[in-house]
Amino acid sequence: MSAAWGALAGVSGLAGAVTPTPSPTGSAATSLGSPGITGFIVTFVLAVALIGLFLSLTRHLRIVDRRSRQREEQDEADAPAPPASGRGVVPPLQAGDDQAGDDQAGDDRAGGDGAGRR
Protein backbone atom coordinates (compact mmCIF):
# COMPACT_ATOMS: atom_id res chain seq x y z
CA MET A 1 0.00 0.00 0.00
CA SER A 2 2.92 2.27 0.56
CA ALA A 3 3.77 2.00 -3.13
CA ALA A 4 0.34 3.39 -4.03
CA TRP A 5 0.86 6.36 -1.71
CA GLY A 6 4.27 7.01 -3.17
CA ALA A 7 2.90 7.01 -6.74
CA LEU A 8 0.07 9.32 -5.75
CA ALA A 9 2.51 11.74 -4.11
CA GLY A 10 4.65 11.77 -7.27
CA VAL A 11 1.66 12.56 -9.52
CA SER A 12 0.39 15.35 -7.28
CA GLY A 13 3.84 16.91 -7.21
CA LEU A 14 3.96 16.78 -10.99
CA ALA A 15 0.57 18.46 -11.35
CA GLY A 16 1.65 21.32 -9.12
CA ALA A 17 4.79 21.99 -11.15
CA VAL A 18 2.99 22.41 -14.50
CA THR A 19 2.09 25.99 -15.45
CA PRO A 20 -0.56 26.70 -18.10
CA THR A 21 0.59 28.25 -21.35
CA PRO A 22 -0.22 30.96 -22.31
CA SER A 23 -0.71 32.49 -18.92
CA PRO A 24 -3.96 34.49 -18.58
CA THR A 25 -3.73 38.25 -18.44
CA GLY A 26 -5.92 40.30 -16.13
CA SER A 27 -7.55 42.60 -18.75
CA ALA A 28 -8.73 39.85 -21.13
CA ALA A 29 -10.31 37.77 -18.36
CA THR A 30 -12.34 40.66 -16.92
CA SER A 31 -13.64 41.97 -20.26
CA LEU A 32 -15.02 38.54 -21.25
CA GLY A 33 -16.78 37.92 -17.95
CA SER A 34 -19.38 40.71 -18.13
CA PRO A 35 -21.24 42.47 -20.95
CA GLY A 36 -20.58 45.80 -19.29
CA ILE A 37 -22.54 49.01 -19.69
CA THR A 38 -23.15 48.41 -23.41
CA GLY A 39 -24.91 45.12 -22.73
CA PHE A 40 -27.01 46.72 -19.99
CA ILE A 41 -28.08 49.58 -22.27
CA VAL A 42 -29.00 47.22 -25.12
CA THR A 43 -31.00 44.98 -22.77
CA PHE A 44 -32.76 47.98 -21.17
CA VAL A 45 -33.74 49.48 -24.54
CA LEU A 46 -35.03 46.10 -25.70
CA ALA A 47 -37.11 45.70 -22.52
CA VAL A 48 -38.62 49.21 -22.90
CA ALA A 49 -39.47 48.51 -26.55
CA LEU A 50 -41.17 45.21 -25.66
CA ILE A 51 -43.20 46.83 -22.89
CA GLY A 52 -44.37 49.46 -25.38
CA LEU A 53 -45.34 46.78 -27.89
CA PHE A 54 -47.27 44.80 -25.27
CA LEU A 55 -49.20 47.90 -24.16
CA SER A 56 -50.05 48.73 -27.77
CA LEU A 57 -51.19 45.17 -28.42
CA THR A 58 -53.43 45.24 -25.34
CA ARG A 59 -54.98 48.54 -26.42
CA HIS A 60 -55.71 47.26 -29.94
CA LEU A 61 -57.18 44.00 -28.64
CA ARG A 62 -59.54 45.95 -26.37
CA ILE A 63 -60.66 48.07 -29.33
CA VAL A 64 -61.32 44.96 -31.44
CA ASP A 65 -63.24 43.34 -28.58
CA ARG A 66 -65.36 46.47 -28.06
CA ARG A 67 -66.17 46.69 -31.79
CA SER A 68 -67.08 43.01 -31.87
CA ARG A 69 -69.54 43.47 -28.99
CA GLN A 70 -71.03 46.54 -30.71
CA ARG A 71 -71.54 44.56 -33.93
CA GLU A 72 -73.19 41.70 -32.05
CA GLU A 73 -75.53 44.15 -30.30
CA GLN A 74 -76.32 45.83 -33.64
CA ASP A 75 -77.03 42.46 -35.28
CA GLU A 76 -79.32 41.50 -32.42
CA ALA A 77 -81.16 44.82 -32.70
CA ASP A 78 -81.56 44.45 -36.49
CA ALA A 79 -82.74 40.83 -36.35
CA PRO A 80 -86.50 40.29 -36.19
CA ALA A 81 -87.77 39.35 -32.76
CA PRO A 82 -88.85 35.72 -32.43
CA PRO A 83 -92.60 35.18 -31.99
CA ALA A 84 -93.91 34.74 -28.46
CA SER A 85 -95.17 31.27 -29.31
CA GLY A 86 -92.95 29.31 -31.65
CA ARG A 87 -95.71 26.98 -32.89
CA GLY A 88 -97.69 27.52 -36.05
CA VAL A 89 -96.21 30.93 -36.82
CA VAL A 90 -94.75 31.30 -40.30
CA PRO A 91 -92.27 34.14 -40.73
CA PRO A 92 -93.16 36.62 -43.47
CA LEU A 93 -91.33 36.18 -46.76
CA GLN A 94 -89.08 38.95 -47.90
CA ALA A 95 -88.43 39.96 -51.49
CA GLY A 96 -85.96 37.61 -53.12
CA ASP A 97 -86.56 34.66 -50.78
CA ASP A 98 -86.67 31.38 -52.67
CA GLN A 99 -88.06 28.73 -50.38
CA ALA A 100 -89.47 25.27 -50.87
CA GLY A 101 -92.93 26.57 -49.85
CA ASP A 102 -93.22 28.30 -53.26
CA ASP A 103 -94.38 25.00 -54.80
CA GLN A 104 -97.79 25.36 -53.23
CA ALA A 105 -98.19 28.85 -54.64
CA GLY A 106 -97.99 27.47 -58.21
CA ASP A 107 -101.81 27.21 -58.43
CA ASP A 108 -102.19 30.96 -58.06
CA ARG A 109 -99.81 31.85 -60.89
CA ALA A 110 -101.08 32.66 -64.33
CA GLY A 111 -100.90 29.56 -66.48
CA GLY A 112 -99.98 27.39 -63.54
CA ASP A 113 -101.10 23.80 -63.52
CA GLY A 114 -100.51 23.29 -59.81
CA ALA A 115 -97.12 21.64 -60.36
CA GLY A 116 -95.12 24.67 -59.23
CA ARG A 117 -91.42 25.04 -60.04
CA ARG A 118 -88.76 22.48 -59.42
Image (cartoon, rainbow, N blue to C red):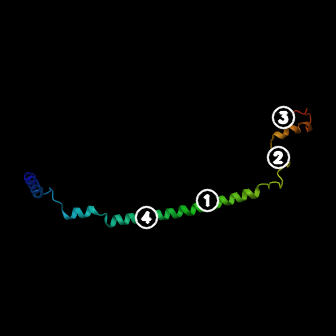
Q: Are marks 2 and 4 in contact (CB under 8 Å)?
A: no
Q: Is 41 in front, or is 11?
A: 11
98 over 5 or under it: above or below: above
Q: How far is mark 1 from mark 3, CA to CA? A: 46 Å
Which comes before the other along the chain, label 2 or label 1? 1
Assess disc 1: are there few (<14), some (14-19) or many (≥20) residues with their C-alpha within 10 Å of its C-alpha. Answer: few
The tag on residue 47 is 4
Residue corresponding to mark 1: 64
Say which quarter of the image contains residue 114. top right
Q: Are marks 1 and 3 in contact (CB under 8 Å)?
A: no
The tag on residue 95 is 2
2 vs 3, front mark = 3
Q: Position of residue 11 (x, y in %)?
A: 10, 53
Look at 27% across and 62% down and name the residue there: 33
Amino acid type at mark 4? Ala
Furthest residue toward front: 1
Q: Does residue 89 appear to the left or right of 14 in the view shown? A: right
**Label 3's element?**
loop
